[in-house]
Amino acid sequence: MTQSFLPYARHVVDEDDIAAVIEVLRSDWLTTGPKVAQFEQAVADFVGNSHAVAVASGTAALHAAIAAIGIGPGDEVIVPAMTFIATANSVVFQGGIPVFADVEPETLLIDPDDVEKRISACTKAIIAVDYAGQPCDYDVLGEIAKKYRLALVADACHSLGGEYKGRKVGTLADLTVFSFHPVKHITTGEGGMVVTNSVELADKIRRFRNHGISTDFRQREHAGTFYYEMTELGYNYRITDIQCALGERQLAKLPQWLERRRTIAGCYDELLAGVTGVSPLGVSNDVRHAFHLYVVKLAERYNRRQVFCQVRDSGIGVNVHYLPVYLHPFYRERFGYAQGLCPKAESAYEHILSLPIWPGMHDDHVERVVKELCGVLP
Ligand SMILES: *Cc1c(COP(=O)(O)O)cnc(C)c1O
């Protein structure tokens, strides 16, 4: 029997998700109708914070967050070297300068000591990234932010459903950003959300997603007026009712999916415990990990590129997250960044491998991944 290719991540869409989308297609509002507000409220309730604003993508959510805290030309924002490019790009969108901090080798989370070293008179904010789904050390990052009067943004695109010292991701920073891309915990196709306890920041983000206009179409219809004013520069970063109906159904299944992710991670931990040369990343006792990714480090003696190709050829969709952002040609050319800026992130990048993890995976899939991985290690 030929075995199917196992991707590193995959969405789960059930019949009830499909029915919810069809219902919206038959309704009066395809975009910015009742479903957007309902999905926002559901996410706010889930994370236990006051305001949630849904937008077109996680990247749009990051951009909106960075704009809302007033980042502009010349402002520096500290971001980890080990993240998806969009974290740093959001700073560049506003004319700011991403300053890269190195990561802790055990967890690949931003190193608070290195953050403090890279603060200058131009620093305005820190973006923490909950790499792989493990929340950062928010108590320490919060103290640094307070001491230097910086805004703290959480890029929680990996960690929806995670916890830090019993507090939920979504309540740990001034603004928290989620993504609903199909590889993430729940999906709306494309989509994102900003969560905050500040009504001012939430209102700014609502305007930012709608061209900088202070009312939306439905509010004007309701008030019987055509008149609107644009008070600041914004974008069309709106999300549709079609997407938010899907998001609502997905969110209802998140608790069981988180459990499944944690179970799969536990299976990997057990199966890999006896394998020399393959070490899972460290997990702090202070957190509940959300396991967007399950990342292992290969011993120095292995050629990661070769292992990657051989495991792929065996039908296992391993992946690598990520090349340190500043090593991308754009960042080298625009900001003059070069090899050596964050040595721990660079060295980790040479040895990491993301193994498949998503809630629809079966136990025998997990065993197959470990068998194929071990099979190619010389
Ligand atoms: C997925 C992701 C984003 C961007 O989200 P999109 O919805 O794809 O725009 C940003 N940061 C991190 C860490 C991500 O994983």
Image: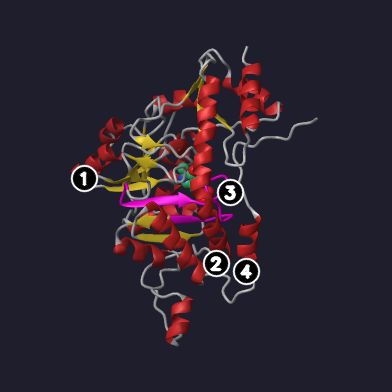
Label pair 4/1, CB-CB below 8 angstroms: no
C-alpha separation, residue under disc 2 versus residue under disc 1: 38 Å
For this orientation, the residue located farthest to the bottom is: 224
Ligand 1 under 8 Å from disc 4 Cβ: no
The Cα–Cα distance between marks 4 and 1, rounded to whole angstroms, is: 47 Å
Q: Distance between the residues labelled 1 and 3?
A: 35 Å
Q: Assign a secondary structure to mark 1.
A: helix
Q: What residue type is labelled 1?
A: Lys
Please say whether residue 309 is one of the residues in the magenta stretch: no
Circle 1 Cα neighbour tier, 10 Å, few/some/many (<14 / 14–19 / ≥20): few
Looking at the rendered structure, which numbered label has been put on residue 182?
Answer: 3
Give the main secondary structure of the magenta stretch. Answer: loop
SS state under label 3: loop
Q: In which quarter of the image is residue 339?
A: top left
Question: Which residue is label 2 attached to?
Answer: 241
Q: Is mark 3 within 8 Å of ligand 1?
A: no
Q: What stretch is highlighted in magenta?
A: 172-193
Q: Earlier in the sequence, mark 2 or mark 1?
A: 1
What SS does tag 2 mark? helix
Q: What residue type is labelled 3?
A: Pro
312 lies above or below 100: above
Which mark is drawn over residue 146?
A: 1
Nearer mark to the viewer, of 4 and 3: 4
Q: Is residue 189 rendered magenta in the image? A: yes
Q: How far apart are marks 3 and 2 (CA)?
A: 17 Å
Quadrant of the drawing holding the C terminus: top right
The disc at residue 23 is 4
